[in-house]
Image (cartoon, coloured by chain):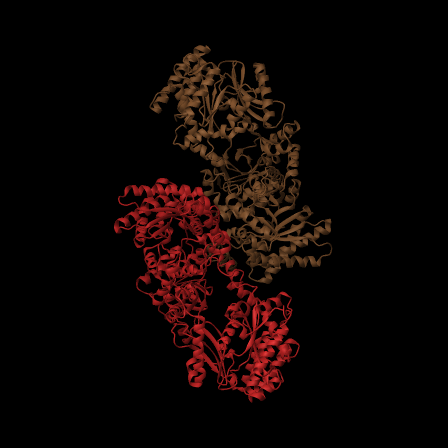
Chain colours: A brown, B red
Amino acid sequence: MPGGVTKWVYAFSEGSRDMRDLLGGKGANVADMTRLGLPVPPGFTITTAACMAFLGADRVLPDGLADQIDIHLAALEASAGKRLGDPSDPLLVSVRSGGRDSMPGMMDTILNLGLNDESVEGLATVTGNPRFAFDSYRRFIQMYGDVVCEVERHHFESALDALKAERGAQSDVDLGADDLRGLCDRFKAIFAEHRGEAFPQHPRAQLDGAVRAVFESWENRRAYDYRRHHGIPHDLGTAVNVQRMVFGNTGERSGTGVAFTRNNTTGEGGRPFGDFLMNAQGEDVVAGIRTPHPLEELKAILPDAFTELLDTMALLERTYGDMQDVEFTIEDGRLYMLQTRNGKRGALAMVRIACDLVDEGLVTEDDALARLIAPAQIPQLLLPQLDARGVRISGLVPLAMGVNASPGAATGAIVLTADEAERRGAAGEKVILVRDETTPDDLHGMIAAQGIVTARGGKTSHAAVVAVGMGCPAVCGVSALRFDGEAISIGGTVFAPGDIITIDGTGGGVYAGAAPVTDPDPRNPYLMRVLDWADRVRVLTVRTNADTPEDARRAREFGAEGIGLCRTEHMFFSDDRLPLVQAMILSEDDDERGRLLALLRPFQVDDFTGLFREMRGLPVTIRLLDPPLHEFLPGLLELSLQAAEDVRSGVRNPEVIAQLARAKDLHEVNPMLGTRGVRLGLEFPEILRMQAGAIMEAAVAVRDETGEAPLVEIMIPLVAYEEELHRARAIVVAEVELVLAMSEGPRVEYRVGTMIELPRAALTAGTIAREAEFFSFGTNDLTQTTLGFSRDDAEKGFLGMYLRENLLTSNPFETLDVDGVGRLIRIAAADARPIRPDIKLGICGEHGGDPASIEFCHGVGLDYVSCSPFRVQVARIAAGQAALRGAHGAAA
Amino acid sequence: MPGGVTKWVYAFSEGSRDMRDLLGGKGANVADMTRLGLPVPPGFTITTAACMAFLGADRVLPDGLADQIDIHLAALEASAGKRLGDPSDPLLVSVRSGGRDSMPGMMDTILNLGLNDESVEGLATVTGNPRFAFDSYRRFIQMYGDVVCEVERHHFESALDALKAERGAQSDVDLGADDLRGLCDRFKAIFAEHRGEAFPQHPRAQLDGAVRAVFESWENRRAYDYRRHHGIPHDLGTAVNVQRMVFGNTGERSGTGVAFTRNNTTGEGGRPFGDFLMNAQGEDVVAGIRTPHPLEELKAILPDAFTELLDTMALLERTYGDMQDVEFTIEDGRLYMLQTRNGKRGALAMVRIACDLVDEGLVTEDDALARLIAPAQIPQLLLPQLDARGVRISGLVPLAMGVNASPGAATGAIVLTADEAERRGAAGEKVILVRDETTPDDLHGMIAAQGIVTARGGKTSHAAVVAVGMGCPAVCGVSALRFDGEAISIGGTVFAPGDIITIDGTGGGVYAGAAPVTDPDPRNPYLMRVLDWADRVRVLTVRTNADTPEDARRAREFGAEGIGLCRTEHMFFSDDRLPLVQAMILSEDDDERGRLLALLRPFQVDDFTGLFREMRGLPVTIRLLDPPLHEFLPGLLELSLQAAEDVRSGVRNPEVIAQLARAKDLHEVNPMLGTRGVRLGLEFPEILRMQAGAIMEAAVAVRDETGEAPLVEIMIPLVAYEEELHRARAIVVAEVELVLAMSEGPRVEYRVGTMIELPRAALTAGTIAREAEFFSFGTNDLTQTTLGFSRDDAEKGFLGMYLRENLLTSNPFETLDVDGVGRLIRIAAADARPIRPDIKLGICGEHGGDPASIEFCHGVGLDYVSCSPFRVQVARIAAGQAALRGAHGAAA
């Protein structure tokens, strides 16, 4: 190569796995395998840099590239002893794309390049296998037509189907050489018809076309969307791998297959696991045209190749320190390795493989934790899951799909009301609660149900949030769910209450009847080991969001180190309390309000005592009352309808009239931005006093009962101004000290702090910190206000559209918006620490259980994350990984 | 004074006006007058530093203070030739508070200190005037009791009233010496009864008590609230002025009064203006116990004192370069000056005085602009105002008070519906539209009305915002307004439609009948000069928010240099368009939607043509459609009531059922955070295309008609993500270029930009700037989201409470929240400029017309502010003042 010219092309023997950026993942791994001396058909890789140069120069191939391809092609021809497209004995090549990151949606592959009307005859002659030659040629015409020339695949498939029908053939293999020769002619005609030109015959031109097509595929819409969705930069480009073809379709001593080095469902090792087809090319295995055979059957057919494959896979697993997913071809009894990559696996397999690889000495614990564990998959281990294999075998298909709102599978009888769910649940029946959408009024039914289905709402709908919190499977937003009086229809099938359905909250499907389900092992020993690795390295503390003793206990079992958020308003909605709460809010008389609050106080003391008992010795953050006012009040619509009805009937109901007037007074256009949190508390300071007093009474009671008090943290929500916190804090502290003054025994420690859940609070955190001993970032509401997205509305509206159309690549209510919300958190943390160096900083939105968001929290140097009980293990692992990735000191 | 001890006390002769921080405003000015050789009774000032030392040391007087007071008191006694409280011929002193800033609510004053049971007899003897002596003593006991010892004033006043009744006295002056002697005994008994101790007799102890009381008054609730409200720091402290008493109550050659150097209503100069009382002490003038005389009558009574007073006032005005408000006392024919300060004045007087002082050579134009003009008062000049003097004379009192939502006064007949307002208005009648609250549906009635009254809503309610925009007086949130069928009651008085009322939008009152009103002069020559001064120095451009040609024309007359915000949604609500818009939104068929939009397009072209014609040659920013979806749709409540009614009547109305279903689908819990702005535009790109096309068609038409196109700025609202703007911009640009390609003639320039009205947009302004040629900070919505305050709800709810209780010192929807919202603006400006150095930055919320907010905008270096037409002059002046204050380069 002339000096000064960029090296655009690398022979496989020149690359290595360190060159993924330049050669792509596939190219780097094939180079690795070549250097390991494994049986890889020779070839070369055109770099990602060449791709970007091509795209950046208006689709002109960069200087030197054509020459370098010629040189490497010549070397390939020399090593093979054949020339590309030689009419008498052609060298054929495959051309495959492959970027740094795996992008399955855009992996364009062209096999058998180099065939044309002449060389196909040469191939037939030299192999003595005309069927093979024409089978290869028809495949090439179809692939080249589809990938390079935009002649859609279905045109070719229809012609193949027509031919099979004509011949009465069950499968491709039932077609003979003449059939396939005729099919090639038909395919060329189809090509000419759609392109207005003949199928290209010149092999070097074929190769150029293929290279250009692969380069251009980097910018197609599908690839662009895929990258947006997976956060892959657009300026990487794809490499192109040109490799000598080997053929699995030359006859009965040939074949092709894919295999995992370990079982990808159970994680069991020592025995590879895969499928193969004899006399086939690679795409046949994946396409499911014929049913492939289990890998172990290869042993009987081609024992040498089988042994070599197993040895090779073991070597690859050792080399990469991870379970491998390989693609191989056997040509006339000889094994060739085409690809290797880290294999995808289920949660059970994931934890087991990580432990086994550590035990086998292939990786260290830290390495296993950092590389081999995807924390988002952990919750699958805690819940029954749909048995995918069982479903496939039984031929079940979902009635309808919805949003996979809360993972796990559940089977039960359809119930349409919360009361019915509670009644039948209490009688020991397993039920699935099916609702248009759920409200806090449905809570008792949701608790009683095995699973929840809603017609409306997404992952942050009421149903989804409550279900995730309870670890209850849920499928939400099933648009094909219709209510029709007492019956419902799901995807057009009609059901009556009591009919059995199964829901797959992990995948989002709803099935008729009882679908097969696998049981979880709550103390999976592999998981326990992985958690132990994470706990040893993580810096972040992991707390839980819990409102009940049951949640608190469960979370502590999962390893929660305290409660980061107890939402006290959930305690106000139960049947025995809501009337008192409503009367209190509606009362315009302070004395009456005080009397009602005095009735509520013992309930609250009980609530907190239960929580504190479970969490004794650990910190517990109690958020004072926060819901929008209207959640306490009878609905404006209902009252208006009632009043209209009264007028019509000539009834005069002063209570309805008064309630309607008050409801109109208190009605808010945007309750999310209305009288909530500290605003409500300053409007009704008696509520603050009641709650603060009840909290401390409970803490004292638990101290006296167990000898161990919790570390009480009283959190004042929705603060925008320091002065709000100053005033609310004074009220709270006065009441708490009153309780403490009346109790004997060691002082119960407490802190008063606030939620940072409004942009202004974050922007003025330096002053708010003067009044707050801790901050908890309420990222749910902070996301709503920072983005101007109402959760209640956005997910069923424009946010759904944004995600579908890839305008957003992740739901900001699931994964923290680092640029916007995250910047506010950085600002707040940076401004608060100089004012109060010992301030405790945590996060308690749903993001507290999201691995990417946890990594951000670690980077900002927060003290803890708090998440729902079922995400505690996820958070422990994600926190450990964040620590290993060394995302320290990223705070601004 | 011993070396090393702080100087806590200054004789009047030691101070000057540069020492306001230390001596307070009153002390500094009295010192000034002393140094000018004016007849000021001698005395000394105890510093604000002494106050803070006292308060910071748990109310212990700082070291050295008592000694220094003794020394200055001795000097005072020496100069007077009398000793404090001497039983035979006592020196008496006054003790007055006075901080750096005028704080009228807390100005505690104690007169006649030094009197006791003995010295009062001495005073009676030495003056030969026992009536004067006991009059002074009873005043002292009351003031000391009230200010120092918390014996409330009304106890004393009741006793005085009882005595007057007993004696049949009309006034204090009808009481004789013996009466007053007896009253002193009664007062002392009242004091002893409430304090449990005798009235203090020792003069030095009296002085100590008075000093402590003044110091402590700095921390009372009233003063604290006052400072919060006026933005005065809490750590300044108050000074204490101790001054030899002079007496206006020694007889018929004595008196006391207050005067302005110029007329404080008209601004007319050359003739002071004030009131006085003979034989009285200062508080009598203010208290209104007797009716004071106009100042000019003093000339006849005491010509020498009168002349000296006029000369003194002229000197003071020259000294301070501003109209002065003085307090004086005449003792036995001799004039004493007690206080001088800059006088408060109305808007007319303000502009005239500023010009006159410039013309008289007393101040420069810049100085006059910076110091003598309060821009917030300017709108008073543009509107009829309630004639306060006329109202007082005619004995009118308001029926009820509401929020002074839009300034100016208006008289007219009550109308209760917008249609009625339009009908009677068209007939030439003057009407006041009285509504519970207004909605966009009322717009035609609001335009026809002279004034608007609502029962609900504050300064940013729909009624207020629209009224301010139209320059129409409005009183909102009149809680004493009740609707009762066809009648209404206001503060208990019943009115029928057609009855005449007058509203005072400047003060907030509603009056029965036609109250006297003064007419404005739209081209007030003094105002024109002041505006000219401002225009010569200001850096900020001033644009207007205008949606109609009429608004645009008016604003241009007021000096607007373009349109900063045209809200196109207002164009969609008129009767001929709303049905088309509703049908378009409800349509689920793209073709139908396209057809309806094609019908709307000519309307929009007309709208924009009218605006562009008025603004030819100037920039015009058009915001594309932004309202929440629900504003276009029939109400959920109304539809539900209709549907319930239909069910009851057995009617089946498929249209109502379908509309209800669609309304439920589109119903949003928090419309403010829902499908608006760019979200709506991306959901229905046809709307973006229609608007963008109509805008450019209109611009081309105006170019062709007038030879001068506007500089078109197309603004895409509610952007949170760069990608939203990227996609919307592409749609807009394509349509605009299509129109341009079809037109001949010079290219019409246009820019595409966005509103920064969500925290995320500000936080990611660096990336958004890549797609935006300008930013307009939409501070109304930015305030809502940053603070989490829904305007619709907050002002009638918790925000009202916050302002009443001084938790907030200003309404963040009126004055920009600099710490929160302002910080976001700084961040956005700082991040955007490096990405796009020529980006235009402006503000278009209501804050664009608020002087404090304009100063902030100048400091951040924005290019322009945009405000309602009636605020354009305010903004010009405020921008000039900001430039003079040199708030340059404050951007982060």
Residue B313, x across and y down, in percent: 44, 76
Q: Position of residue A698 (x, y in %)?
A: 68, 52
The answer to whether residue B584 is left or right of residue A479 is left
Query: Where is residue B346 drawn, in percent x and y?
Result: 41, 69
Q: Establish if B195 lies above or below B304.
A: above
Along the viewing direction, whichever of A429 and A339 lies nearer the viewer: A339
Q: Can residue B642 be seen in this view?
A: no
Which residue is at the far front? B3
Q: Is residue A468 above or below residue A307?
A: below
Q: Quadrant of residue B203?
A: bottom right
| Residue B395 seen by the camera | yes
Question: Is residue B409 rendered to the left or right of residue A386?
Answer: left
Quadrant assignment for the N terminus of chain B: bottom right
Foreground pick, A658 / B425: B425
- Residue A478 position within the rendered picture, expressed as x and y whole percent measured from the top left: 50, 38
**Residue B555, placed above or below residue B74:** above
Residue under the point 59% across and 19% down = A296
Relative horizontal placement of residue B474, taking residue B62 as reference (left or right)? left
* Count of all numbered marks drawn on residues in the image: 0
Eyeballing the image, is A137 above or below B804?
above
Instruction: From the viewer's side, name the closer residue of B266 and B21.
Output: B21
